[in-house]
Amino acid sequence: MYVNEFCKWVRNCLLSYILMRGYRKQLIITFVVLKCTLPVETVLGQALMVDQAYTLLKQGQLDKSQQAIDIAVEHSSTINDAKAWYLRGFIYQKLAEQDATSAHELRRVSIASAEHCLELDTLNQFTKDCQSLISHAYNSFLKEVISFLNTQEYAEVFTPLQPIIDSEHVLAQNYKPEALFYYGYAALQLGQRDSARQYLFKALQAGYQDALVYEIEFAHRASLLQYDSARWYLSQGRALFPENASLHIAELNFLMQQENYKQAEQSVKQYLQRDPDNVEGLLLAGTIYEKLLAAGENTRQYFTEQEATYQHILQITPDHLQANYNLGIAYYNRGVTLINEAAQSYDMDLIQFNQLLEECSTLFLTALPYLEKVSQLDRSHVNALKALQGVYYNINDYEQYNLVKEKLQKL
Amino acid sequence: MDEYQRTQDQIHTFYLYNFTRYFVWPTPPEQTFVIGVMGEHSIVKELTTMANTRTVGGKPISIRIYQNPQEIDPECHIVFIPHENSYWLSEILSVTRERPSLIVSSKPGLGQFGSLLNFVAERGKIIFEINEEAIKSRQLKFIQQLKAIGHIL
């Protein structure tokens, strides 16, 4: 008993010395300590090492605490000690908080230690604590990711997301959908469309609900000409996120691509009810009315709608090039269409035809300032010049017609 | 051909066809009603389309292209001078002087120079000038309603 007590005293002194002097001397002195303690109780020795790590942790000596716990979890006597692994997870978490440059790796060790503790902890003594550690680490990774996303440092988000995405542990499943989404979103922002779609789709499969996921999956299916499938993702997305503008625009584009202009008309009206001054929506509406006009349905009504739509844009932004051009062309095309329709019948009364020409010339003259404006805003706008050429020709202003013709030839 | 030229051709074609309904020639067409065009011009396509589906006085319409005034057929009922070939007007008037041919031009001022009908633009709208004296001298008659649309010189 006396010898044992003495050896305990020596061992404790030396343990403290090890931890105070660093890891290099540790191995040598550990040997001395072990020699001294043997054959007393090896298990007890390493258990005390765990205690020592804990004491050092409480004293704020994190580095030494780390060294002690690393020895403890590698030693055969405590390698299966749940407490040691939990403590290691905790110490590494603290280390990660203090060392930003190595935080990722330290956090990974913290997670791995806590996960190992859960495997060993058959009595569930550390279950909640370990779960908290893991959750904390995942939350820290995600917090970091969100910070990078906010500062648009998209390339930086992949590393902190990888541990969550790679983990097969049950606790990671709660974080995985969000992580997959962020991964896909960052890839999308970096123009890595295939990778983005792959991760966003995984996020959707994992249960993550975001309009972007539906939008990207829809676009992917549509690009593969899988229209039924594309339509499904679109309608699901629209149903889940009826207020999402991006998805709504995607729906409008899809309807137009499918030449379903009647449904597109209803859809764009809904869009503009929510956001009446949205120029993108107004331009889409103008295009839809133009298509409906071309289909020959309620031409006068749709022309009026088209005219009002572009004028609305020009009230908001008078120098909007596309709106000026579209409105000028709308007037011009309307005039040409009326003449085409009338001229093909040949039997219209001359007076009536004369009145129609009056209406057409008014339309041509109304088109002029808008097309001139486009030409001022963009002197090399070939289509605007061609339209101007047509207008001047049709109002028989050959002087202006020739001037525009010269400009076109120079281009 | 640009679309805007087609629109002009359609308007001119519409008018040329309707002139056949508003004018009276001293003798009805024997075989065909002839519309001649001076020189190669895009309007020929529109006129041909019209001629395929219309008749004048129960006779088919024949569209002919004349490369110079000397080629104009004696039985040509309407001679259309496109804007680009306006320089032929005086020679055409001379060649067709004794015939009931309706000479239709399309350049400002040609009405004053003896063209019977002349397309011009007024505030961007195509109208036509009517040279009543010249029409009378060709033994042609027109329905007075035409005056409501055209400008009498």
Image: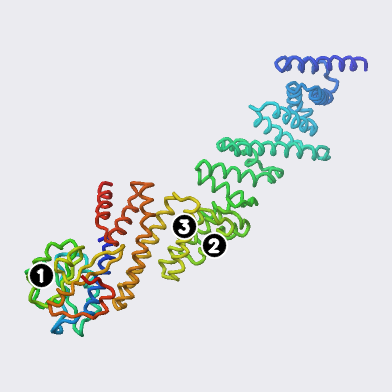
Q: Which quadrant, please, contains the N terminus of chain A?
A: top right
| Vertical comparison of A319 with A327: above or below | above
The mark found on residue A206 in the picture is none
| Vertical comparison of B66 with A217: above or below | below
Element type at marker 2?
helix
The quadrant where residue A172 appears: top right
Disc count in the image?
3
* Mark nearer the N terminus (2 vs 3): 2
Q: Mark 2 lies on which chain?
A: A
Label 1 belongs to which residue? Answer: B93
Q: What residue sits 53% from the left and 42% below the top?
A: A189
Asked if marks 3 and 1 touch (Cβ < 8 Å), the reply is no
Label 3 belongs to which residue? Answer: A311
Estimate how packed mark 2 is, as few (under 14), some (14 to 19) or many (20 or more) residues with alpha carbons within 10 Å.
some
The mark found on residue A269 in the picture is 2
Q: Which chain carries label 3?
A: A
Q: What residue sits 29% from the left and 58% below the top?
A: A392
Q: Which of marks 3 and 1 is in front?
A: 1
Q: Which of marks 1 and 2 is in front?
A: 1
The quadrant where residue A129 appears: top right
